[in-house]
C-alpha cells in the first residue's frame, strides 16, 4: 500500500526548500552542491526528489537551456505556518499556551530572543484589543 501524501514537507524536502528559500531559484546540480556535505546524494536522487516536490506543488520548474531551474511555489512563511498549525493541532491539541511553554523550555531562548517574544506578544495583545 502506498504512503499517503502529506502537505508538509519531509525532512529531505525541507532541506531542499531551505536552500531555495535562501539562494533563490536553483538547478538540481546547484541544490546538490549546497546540500549537507555530511549526507552526500547522487544527482539522480536529488533530481527525483525535486521532481516529486514539483508534482506535490512545492516547487515550480522552468526549462532553461538543457536544465530545469526550480523555484518555490509556496513561501517559507506559508510552509512554516502550515507545519506549525499541523503540530499545534496534532501534538498540542490546539493549545497555544502548551505549545509555547514547551517551546520555551526546549529552545531556552537568550535575553534578546525573549525581548523579541515579549514585543510580539504585546503587539498581538494591542491588535486584539483594538479589533
Image (cartoon, rainbow, N blue to C red):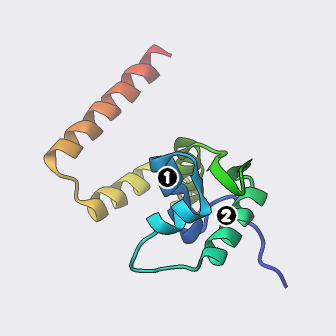
Front residue of this view, candidates 114 and 98: 114
Q: Secondary structure at mark 1?
A: loop
User: Residue sitting at 47 percent across and 48 percent down?
Assistant: 23
Q: Is residue 128 above or below residue 104?
A: above
Say which label, 1 or 2, has the lower sequence index. Answer: 2
Q: Is residue 3 above or below residue 102?
A: below
Q: Position of residue 114 (x, y in %)?
A: 22, 44
User: Residue sitting at 67 percent across and 69 percent down?
Assistant: 47
Q: Secondary structure at mark 2?
A: helix
Is residue 98 in sight in this rendering?
yes
Q: Position of residue 130 (x, y in %)?
A: 45, 14
**Left or right: residue 7 compared with residue 104:** right
**Left or right: residue 96 compared with residue 87:** left
Q: Is residue 110 above or below residue 37?
A: above
Front residue of this view, candidates 60 and 124: 60
> Quadrant where the N terminus lies?
bottom right
Q: Position of residue 79 (x, y in %)?
A: 58, 49
- Classify 10 Å Cα crowding around label 1: few (below 14), some (14-19), many (20 and above): few
- Residue 42, located in which quarter of the rendered image? bottom right
Furthest toward the front, the residue is 65
User: Residue sitting at 22 percent across and 59 percent down?
Assistant: 108
**Left or right: residue 7 compared with residue 100:** right
Q: Label for residue 95?
A: 1
- Classify 10 Å Cα crowding around label 2: few (below 14), some (14-19), many (20 and above): many
Q: Are marks 1 and 2 in contact (CB under 8 Å)?
A: no
Q: Label for residue 50?
A: 2
Q: Is residue 121 above or below residue 8?
A: above
Mark 1 to mark 2 CA distance (whole Å): 34 Å
Q: Position of residue 73 (x, y in %)?
A: 67, 45
Furthest toward the bottom, the residue is 1
Amino acid at each position: 500500500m502506498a504512503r499517503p501524501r502529506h502537505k508538509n514537507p519531509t525532512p529531505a524536502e525541507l532541506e531542499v526548500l531551505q536552500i531555495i528559500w535562501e539562494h533563490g531559484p536553483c538547478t538540481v546540480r546547484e541544490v546538490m552542491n549546497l546540500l549537507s556535505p555530511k549526507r552526500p546524494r547522487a544527482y539522480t536522487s536529488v533530481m527525483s526528489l525535486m521532481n516529486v516536490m514539483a508534482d506535490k506543488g512545492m516547487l515550480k520548474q522552468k526549462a532553461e537551456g538543457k536544465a530545469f531551474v526550480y523555484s518555490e511555489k509556496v513561501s517559507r512563511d506559508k510552509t512554516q505556518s502550515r507545519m506549525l498549525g499541523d503540530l499545534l493541532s496534532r501534538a498540542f491539541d490546539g493549545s497555544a499556551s502548551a505549545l509555547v511553554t514547551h517551546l520555551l523550555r526546549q529552545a531556552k531562548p537568550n535575553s534578546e530572543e525573549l525581548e523579541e517574544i515579549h514585543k510580539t506578544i504585546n503587539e498581538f495583545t494591542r491588535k486584539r484589543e483594538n479589533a
